[in-house]
């Protein structure tokens, strides 16, 4: 039984060592590829400074019928959603 446990521990250490080594190699490989891409990639285009957009202009006056319809719709909404 003692020999079997010794072999199990050896196998576990070997497996964990291989996984650790693979992960270390993977980290270095991705870092290396990232540096290569940054060196040879075209520069990012310069974005122009944001300018203020003109707000859409509302009509100067609202039709009285439209205003009345809006008032009725608001009143109906408020009557249905009272707390």
Image (cartoon, rainbow, N blue to C red):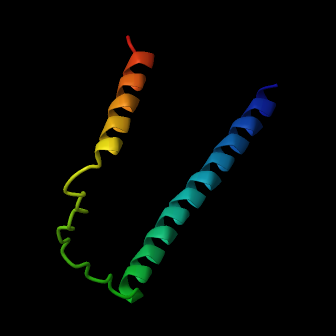
Farthest residue, direction front = 65
- Could you tell me which residue is drawn at 28 percent across and 43 percent down? 64
31 or 24, nearer to the observer: 31
Instruction: Indicate the position of residue 24 as horizontal and vertical percent values.
Output: 51, 60
29 or 48, nearer to the observer: 48
Instruction: Indicate the position of residue 68 as horizontal and vertical percent values.
Output: 33, 36
8 relative to 58 in the view: left or right: right
Farthest residue, direction top = 83
Instruction: Indicate the position of residue 31 as horizontal and vertical percent values.
Output: 44, 69
67 relative to 30 in the view: left or right: left
Q: Quadrant of residue 71?
A: top left
Up the image or down, 38 lies above or below 57; here it is below
53 or 43, nearer to the observer: 53
- Could you tell me which residue is drawn at 64 percent across and 55 percent down? 18
Up the image or down, 28 lies above or below 5; here it is below
Instruction: Indicate the position of residue 65 as horizontal and vertical percent values.
Output: 34, 42
35 relative to 58 in the view: left or right: right
Up the image or down, 79 lies above or below 31; here it is above
Up the image or down, 12 lies above or below 83; here it is below
Q: Quadrant of residue 55?
A: bottom left
> Which quadrant, please, contains the N terminus?
top right
13 relative to 53 in the view: left or right: right
- Could you tell me which residue is drawn at 38 percent across and 11 percent down? 83
Looking at the rendered structure, the number of numbered marks drawn on it comes to 0
């Amino acid at each position: 039984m003692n020999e079997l446990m010794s072999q199990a521990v050896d196998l576990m250490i070997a497996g964990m060592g291989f996984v650790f080594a693979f992960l270390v190699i993977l980290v270095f490989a991705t870092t290396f590829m990232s540096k290569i891409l940054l060196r040879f990639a075209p520069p990012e285009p310069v974005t122009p400074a944001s300018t203020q957009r003109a707000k859409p202009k509302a009509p100067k006056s609202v039709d009285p019928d439209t205003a009345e319809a809006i008032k009725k719709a608001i009143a109906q909404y408020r009557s249905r959603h009272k707390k």
